[in-house]
Image (spheres, rainbow, N blue to C red):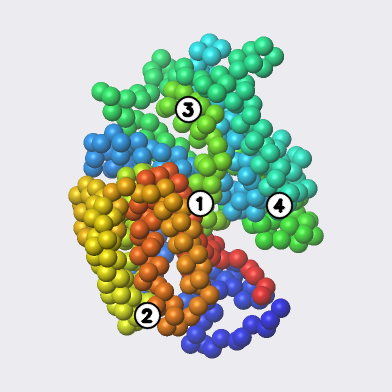
């Protein structure tokens, strides 16, 4: 443990020091006097109550249907709200409780299947929404509690293995549940296709209007999100919330202080599972079907990405992470939009890395020159090497600089993909002028791989982009965009 260097009165500490807890560090940060013309405005914004920001946020989200009539955009917004709810639930377990739960998506699927069994033609049970939803939430909480029972003495990798086994168990039962004691419970691999929309007092919630996604479900999802946010806000400020954070920081110290560590773990699992089950209810009632493929590991990685990106432990942070990742995943489905995102991120990364340095201009000019030279050489060797289709827009412009073959040989994608990874690793080992020399061809090779290899497989490309975003963020802001600062002894 190294001694902390004392700070002068003119240079305040940037984070928690040894002997300071989280609240003291954050309180000291708030007391910092910032100079400049924006200081009074910043102080006023900090004084605005949290419920005002929540009301403003929900109000802005409610205006989205008035801005666009696109059913696709509205459905993406609805899915983003579901992501926000799932991220809030996972934040209870991971961000507050400090428990590595890899079975979280199973509770989401459990809620969806439970609602499907309570309101579908599968067993001809049709409960109204005000009965089905509370029942599903209770089922999710009980399932989380039961998962926590054998896991309450585990932590770290051991807890992750047990929860991952629970996810695999749920997927196996959902996929093969068409013959459980001679009864078709889950519909097997084909799922359940007769799920009814939310209904109460003889009225069904409208799913579509003239073949377009109806905004009614969007407003209902926003309402549930607001209720969850408010409830978790009060829980976070309660003794239970403070105890969860103590458990997260140091379970042994929390137990030594007399806190019921095992009970806190069980409560964390139950709260997170209940929120996931509630979200699964809304999803199943809208989709009118439940399929086992929906609740696989990729969804878990996506939700974890939102929590890590926004900042584990911060409610505002995980909501922001969902707002970024949800629409971004949809934008990356379109090759043209993916191309724009790639080049914007590339330029933004260069600007951030070099800022106002003269090397930024050198690298940009060298990359452009290197590309034009490679394009000219490839065209001189054979015209088919630069005769790739250009569908207009940015690709048409890029085609004058980037090599886009008409027919991509089978060996080029793996070789170029492995090559750009190897060159990027080499860049981390060299410094000075040698790095500047290697950077332009590396950037050009990355652009070649993205345009010729990755865009032909949009699904893997989307998650590779998520991984790159997380890597860059962990270097710049290890706690996430709005993550809470932790007490660390270094």
Which residue in the structure is indicated by mark 2? 35
Sequence-earlier tag: 4 or 2: 2
Sequence-earlier tag: 3 or 1: 3
Check disc 4 and report its element: helix, strand or loop: helix
Q: CA distance from mark 3 to mark 1?
A: 23 Å
Sequence-earlier tag: 4 or 1: 4
Q: Is residue 195 left or right of residue 17?
A: left
Sequence-earlier tag: 3 or 4: 4
Mark 3 or 4, which is nearer the eye? 4
**Residue count near mark 1 (Cα–Cα under 10 Å), binned few <14, some 14–19, many ≥20:** many
Sequence-earlier tag: 2 or 1: 2
Q: CA distance from mark 3 to mark 4?
A: 32 Å
Q: Position of residue 49 (x, y in %)?
A: 43, 57
Q: CA distance from mark 2 to mark 1?
A: 35 Å
Mark 3 or 1, which is nearer the eye? 1
**Residue count near mark 3 (Cα–Cα under 10 Å), binned few <14, some 14–19, many ≥20:** many
Which residue in the structure is indicated by mark 4? 157
Q: Position of residue 4 (x, y in %)?
A: 64, 82
Check disc 2 and report its element: helix, strand or loop: loop
Q: Is residue 24 left or right of residue 461?
A: right
Q: Are marks 3 and 2 in contact (CB under 8 Å)?
A: no
Q: Position of residue 149 (x, y in %)?
A: 75, 39
The residue drawn where x is 27% and y is 72% is 369
Q: Is residue 410 left or right of residue 87?
A: left
Task: Please tell me which residue lies in front, 82 or 389.
Answer: 389
* Picture disc at residue 477: none
Which residue in the structure is indicated by mark 3? 284
The residue drawn where x is 42% and y is 36% is 221
Mark 3 or 2, which is nearer the eye? 3
Q: Are marks 3 and 1 in contact (CB under 8 Å)?
A: no
């Amino acid at each position: 443990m190294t001694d902390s260097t004392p700070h002068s009165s003119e240079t305040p500490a940037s984070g928690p020091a040894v002997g300071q807890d989280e609240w003291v560090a954050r309180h000291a940060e708030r007391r910092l006097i910032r100079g400049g013309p924006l200081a009074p405005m910043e102080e006023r914004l900090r004084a605005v109550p949290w419920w005002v920001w929540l009301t403003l946020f929900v109000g802005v989200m409610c205006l989205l249907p008035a801005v666009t009539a696109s059913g696709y955009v509205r459905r993406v917004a609805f899915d983003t709200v579901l992501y926000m709810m799932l991220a809030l639930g996972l934040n209870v377990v991971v961000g507050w409780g400090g428990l590595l739960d890899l079975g979280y998506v199973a509770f989401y699927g459990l809620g969806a299947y439970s609602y499907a069994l309570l309101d579908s033609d599968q067993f001809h049970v049709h409960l109204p929404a005000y009965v089905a939803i509370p029942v599903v939430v209770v089922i999710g909480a009980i399932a989380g509690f039961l998962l926590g029972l054998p896991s309450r003495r585990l932590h770290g990798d051991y807890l992750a293995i047990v929860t991952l086994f629970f996810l695999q168990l749920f997927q196996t039962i959902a996929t093969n549940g068409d013959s459980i004691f001679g009864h078709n419970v889950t519909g097997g691999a084909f799922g359940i296709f007769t799920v009814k929309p939310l209904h109460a007092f003889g009225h069904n919630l409208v799913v579509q209007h003239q073949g377009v996604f109806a905004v009614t479900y969007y407003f209902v999802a926003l309402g549930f999100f607001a209720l969850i946010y408010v409830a978790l806000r009060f829980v976070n400020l309660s003794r239970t919330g403070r105890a969860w954070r103590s458990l997260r920081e140091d379970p042994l110290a929390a137990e030594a202080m007399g806190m019921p560590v095992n009970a806190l773990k069980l409560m964390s699992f139950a709260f997170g599972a209940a929120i996931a089950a509630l979200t699964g209810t809304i999803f199943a009632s809208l989709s009118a079907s439940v399929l086992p493929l929906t609740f696989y590991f990729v969804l878990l990685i996506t939700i974890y990405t939102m929590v890590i990106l926004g900042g584990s432990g911060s409610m505002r942070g995980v909501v922001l992470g969902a707002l970024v990742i949800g629409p971004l995943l949809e934008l990356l489905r379109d090759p043209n939009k993916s191309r724009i995102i790639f080049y914007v991120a590339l330029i933004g990364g260069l600007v951030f890395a070099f800022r106002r340095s003269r090397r930024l201009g050198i690298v940009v000019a060298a990359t452009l020159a290197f590309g034009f030279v490679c394009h000219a050489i490839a065209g001189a060797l054979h015209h088919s090497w630069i005769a790739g289709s250009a569908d207009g827009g940015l690709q048409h412009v890029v085609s004058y600089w980037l090599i886009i073959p008409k027919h991509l040989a089978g060996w080029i994608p793996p070789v170029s993909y492995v090559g750009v990874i190897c060159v990027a690793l080499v860049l981390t080992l060299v410094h000075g002028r040698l790095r500047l020399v290697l950077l332009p061809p590396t950037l050009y090779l990355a652009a070649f791989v993205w345009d010729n290899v990755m865009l032909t497989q949009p699904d893997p490309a989307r998650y590779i982009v998520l991984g790159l975003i997380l890597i860059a963020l962990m270097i710049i802001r290890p706690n996430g965009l709005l993550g809470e600062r932790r007490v660390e002894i270094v």
